Image (cartoon, rainbow, N blue to C red):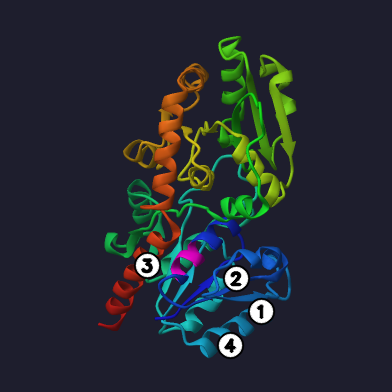
Amino acid sequence: MKPLLLVSEIEDYTISFANGLAQHVPVVLGVPARRYTSFAKYFHSGVDLRLLDWPRHSSAKNPAFLLSLTRLVRRERPSIVHLLSNNVLWLNFAAPLWRPIPLVTTVHDVEIHPGDNETNVLPGWATTLIARQSDGIVVHGESLRSLAVDRFRKPSDRVHVLSHPSIQHYTALAATEGLTPAADRPFTVLLFGRIMAYKGLATLLRAEKALAGRVPDLRITIAGRGDDPWSLQAEMGDPARYDVRRGWIEDRDVAQLFLDADVVVLPYSEASQSGVLNLAAAFGKPVIVTDVGELRATVEPNGIGLVVPPDDPGALAQAIASLAEQPERLAALGHAARIWADGPNAPETVGGHAVDLYRRIIEERAR
């Protein structure tokens, strides 16, 4: 078997998924050179990485690119083509040319998140049509499976669940670079990623304010691109507690942020699943998540953190305080997170499940 993976973004997920898959079968991965060149060093030797001159959505070069991509597909003769995201406007026009090769598409977010202006630039028909053209759809949880069946009008047996694998290349980088947690650091709560409306930034700030002096040695680190936390300074209890890193975070700094965190918070108002959770687990960091999307279904059965209601600063404050005041519980949750990331949710484990899924789809297509 030889799968061909295609994707134009979501680098962290792609690295983990492709590396896990490559431990079972040879993998060809086609990605934009402009986004992936700096990440080439993270790929497993079994990944045949093709850095393509992949235009942006608005470029007039897209028709020519589709022809070259179709030539690549025909030349490689893959067993299956897997689009690792449905945010692929132009691939809608190329997919029919790849028949009879089976096509599967991963849908990370069945519905667009509130305030997600990056994804919302695509017309709704583009993300829907590619899913409907696919022989199979992959989502990251059972509740998302039900939503996908309804949105994409696919039979339930054509919508499959594969978990989002743990993101391990940052832990590998930390080991290679000899990074260690900062000495004598305060109790650090980390909010990381795209800071957008649905990520619950205001909920975290209000939770910090509600904590008052209950956790005297407290730091709130907010890191990533998106909304400016300082625009909500009036919601903060003590601005001196905050360490805000806006914009793109370099890989080495990402690793250091997670090493220095005691707990990672995902106070989302709305979500489907989370790559940040899978990054935190790889570092053995417990999480505090809200009960939205697949977050509870991921956290509770695996014992890797706490779950609170969405948009509830008081509950979030109580969860933060309880972990700050119970170091043994904090350590136990972190240990469970690392076991889960290195075992049931390791890239190699998820890759094995993906190979099984590919075989079923290929066999079904051959009937």
Name the residue nearer the viewer: 124 or 168: 168
Q: What residue is rendered at 74% in x and 43% in y?
A: 247
Predominant SS of the magenta segment: helix
Query: Is there a contact, CB below 8 Å, between mark 2 and mark 3?
Result: no
Q: Quadrant of the N terminus?
A: bottom left
Task: Look at discs 2 and 3 and give the one toward the viewer.
Answer: 3
Judge whether 126 appears above or below 180 on screen: below
* Crowd tier of the residue under label 1, counting other residues whose Cα lies within 10 Å: few below 14, some 14–19, many 20 or above: some
Q: To which residue does mark 2 refer?
A: 90
Amino acid type of the residue tagged 4 in the rendering: Arg
Mark 3 and mark 4: Cα distance apart in space: 23 Å
Mark 2 and mark 1: Cα distance apart in space: 9 Å
Name the N-terminal-most of marks 4 and 1: 1
Q: To which residue does mark 1 refer?
A: 65
Q: Secondary structure at mark 1?
A: helix
Mark 4 and mark 1: Cα distance apart in space: 10 Å
Name the residue nearer the viewer: 122 or 44: 44
Q: Is residue 169 magenta?
A: no
Amino acid type of the residue tagged 2 in the rendering: Trp
Name the N-terminal-most of marks 3 and 1: 1
In the shown orientation, is residue 105 left or right of residue 121? left
* Numbered label attached to residue 71: 4
Name the N-terminal-most of marks 3 and 4: 4
In the shown orientation, is residue 290 left or right of residue 62? left
Name the N-terminal-most of marks 2 and 3: 2
In the shown orientation, is residue 202 left or right of residue 96? right
Name the residue nearer the viewer: 127 or 175: 175
